Amino acid sequence: MAFTRRSALLVSGLGLLTPGGALAKAKPQSSPVREPTQKHLNELNKLVVDVMKKTGVPGMSIAVVTPDRVLYLKGFGVRRAGAADRVDPDTVFQLASLSKPLSATVVAGLVGDGVVSWDHPIARSLPDFAMSDPWVTREITLRDMLCHRSGLPDHAGDLVEDIGYDRDEIMRRLRYIKPDTSFRTHYAYNNAGFSAAGYAAAKTAGKSWADVCDERLYRPLGMASASSRHADFIAHGNRAFGHVRRQGKWVVGEQRKPDAQQPAGGASASARDVATWVRMQLGRGALDGREIVKPEAIGETHFPQIATGPAHDPMRGPTFYGLGWDIDYGGPAQVRWSHSGAFSLGASTCVYVMPAERFGVVALSNSAPVGAPETICRSFLDIVLTGKTERDWLPLFGEAFAKMVVPTYGRDADYAKPLASAPPRASRAAYVGDYRNELYGPIGIVETADGLSLNLGPAPTSYPLRHYSGDIFTFQPPGENASGVSPVRFSRNGGEQATSVVIDYLNANGQGVFTRN
């Protein structure tokens, strides 16, 4: 599966994706229900220190809760590498795709209020919304998008954001994405579609998405630092900076701005805030005796809507996605609700909720994903349920994330190293011109004093092209999903002038072909 850094990773649920798509699962558990004890929490403290030492992750904030109270809430490390400011329980982190179960809770609040239903058609509230099939456009609902069964390809639409299009244009361009499967038959994780559901629910309520989050969840729960506006996160004095690993060191790099897909990945909050929300999840919509969300509405988010993986183990059922939640039946009478979030530009988050055992654990970090939050959460479950860590989770999660960041484009050669003996097959003028693509919009190939450049995106932004071989050039793509240089392949159909160009970076679903005007 292609990894997009905003994704909620299924490694948080049942187990780990292996190269063949099978799942490396934990040993089924059958231990008695128990609340985490002080001994367990002491072990957690040592676990966090150990994982941070092994990974070098700059900062983390951890919480453990039951429905009635917060058992553990602590910050570790620093908000910014090389600086003295420490992470504490109120340090605000970008949540990435941990935003999804939060967003589903917001929509559940509107459902419980009677403002909207789970089966509300999106097009009824977003008139400019359309899928490639008119019938699907009419029929697709909030429920369909919130559980990723739209038929859209995995992560399709993310690159539209990465090249600079705003929220409204991303939503409008969903109509140009070719479906990968038939409607409602398969699971494929999709940030743009999930966001469309959130925006449609907010539009039905007559408010912006961020305002609905404030009014329906954050303020009623007392989540004082939580927001779905990037500007609020940036303005916060006690915030974590995103870090990437370069030459073996964690450094602050380009910071992720997720406003275009707020419901899917735009929330920020402290561990204290998220702990309060998890307590409400365990309370079936209530916190300290106050009903925040109707129990039947929040309960629907925890109900499986689509299978995400087959059952390979008779002691485990298949894995599922609910409404904003990964759902795993991990053994006899044991269910887990979980979700991970990740920005390659510097955020990694994880939550596990054990409804029968009545506790939850949250881990937030300010680093690109290396498996630290998942290792801490999964190991803590082992400690509480079995008395010991069942396996060393860090190498398994780390390997899974390392495989996911391998680029899906430009794999057939080392395009970072031009072939010195392979000059262009045509003059520069043969490639210059304007080209069009429905999904990604127009591009321009222009000649500059230094060679050729690619003009890409709505601005547009200019990217130098470097010749590789024949009619193949390369450029460094923008955005969170760009892991390395991408080939740009011109076709001339026997003539001198290029007639089309394929940008590999944009061609994961076969829609990266641009035709000359």
Image (cartoon, rainbow, N blue to C red):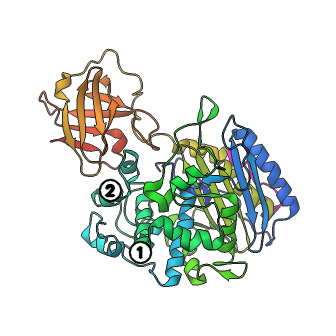
- Amino acid tagged 1: Gly
- Residue bearing mark 2: 169
From the top left corner, tell me how far across and down residue 446 is, in percent: 23, 30
Tell me which residue sits at (46%, 48%) in the image: 2
* Relative to 513, 102 lies left or right: right
Front residue of this view, candidates 34 and 41: 41
Tell me which residue sits at (42%, 65%) in the image: 186
Dot label at residue 206: 1
Q: Magenta stretch: residue 387 in it?
A: yes
* Relative to 393, 95 lies left or right: left
- Res. 15 in view: no
From the top left corner, tell me how far across and down residue 211 is, in percent: 50, 68
* Relative to 43, 272 lies left or right: left
Q: How many marks?
A: 2
**Helix or strand or loop: what does disc 1 sit on?**
loop
Q: Are marks 1 and 2 in contact (CB under 8 Å)?
A: no
Q: Main secondary structure of the magenta part?
A: loop
Which stretch is magenta?
385-394
Q: Magenta stretch: residue 82 in it?
A: no
Tell me which residue sits at (35%, 68%) in the image: 183
